[in-house]
Amino acid sequence: MRPAVRDQERARRQLGLIARVLRAARDAGIPLWLRGGWAMDFFLGEVTRDHGDVDWFAWARDAPALAALLARLGHTPVPGPPAGLQLDFVKDGLDSSFTLIDRDSAGRVTVAGGLWAGTPWPDGLLGAEPGRIGALRAPIVAPRVQIEIKRMMPVWDPSRPRRAKDAEDIARLEAALRARTAG
């Protein structure tokens, strides 16, 4: 059973923010990928639950250009994790987090900064087809990798226990993958 989207207006505003950021980043040549709950929803093709924020992946080399672009779009930087690890912004009460990624000498996608700098993300992280909600297409983290990240985060970082929504997201993604395999 899918939880209700209680705040339809917030979801509509977040989708608008996603569309504007993707369009501006694409025009500036800055690749971005949705991660977290919005990546799941774009894979599933519908908004399945409320989202507290919009989570993204971006290349660390693009961080200065991305920050400047977001400032031009009216986003305000929010202090938080180390700047080499993640950029956080708010616009009109909507939070966005851009986790920065890099590549190691073997070509693997890695954590760009902070305590885990250089640690590889799971293989295939950026290998998914774009997702879609309505007419809006967005690059997303591969669903199988999304499941692995949600399963492993409490192991990788014990200070971040699995949340109920993570378990629900895992079940939702696994069911969708099974249905696509069977179909």
Image (cartoon, rainbow, N blue to C red):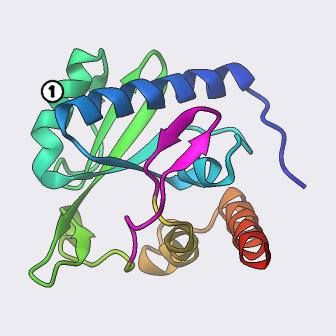
Q: Quadrant of the C terminus?
A: bottom right
Badge 1 crowding class, 10 Å Cα cut-off, few under 14, some 14 to 19, many 20 or more, is few
* Quadrant, the N terminus: bottom right
Q: Residue furthest front?
A: 183
The location of residue 99, given as percent across then percent down, is 31, 52
User: Residue 132 location, x and y as percent?
Assistant: 58, 44
Q: Residue furthest bottom?
A: 106
Q: Amino acid at mark 1?
A: Ala
Whether residue 135 appears in magenta in the rendering, the answer is: yes
Magenta span: chief secondary structure: loop
Q: Quadrant of residue 71?
A: top left
Q: Measuring 58% from the left and 72% from the top, which residue is drawn there?
A: 147
Depth check: give the residue in front, 58 or 80.
Answer: 58
| Observer-nearest of 166 and 23 | 23
- Does residue 25 appear anywhere in the picture? yes
Q: Secondary structure at mark 1?
A: helix
Image position of 82 with respect to 14: above or below = below
- View extreme (right): residue: 1
Q: Is residue 78 visible?
A: no
- Identity of the residue drawn at 83% across and 46% down: 3
Q: Which residue is tagged 1?
A: 68
Residue under the image location 79 percent in, 30 percent down:
6
Is residue 129 magenta-colored? yes
Instruction: Give the image location of residue 148, x and y in percent.
Output: 53, 76
Q: Which residues are magenta?
A: 124-140
Residue 160 locus on image (x, y percent): 50, 65
Total numbered badges shown on the rendered structure: 1
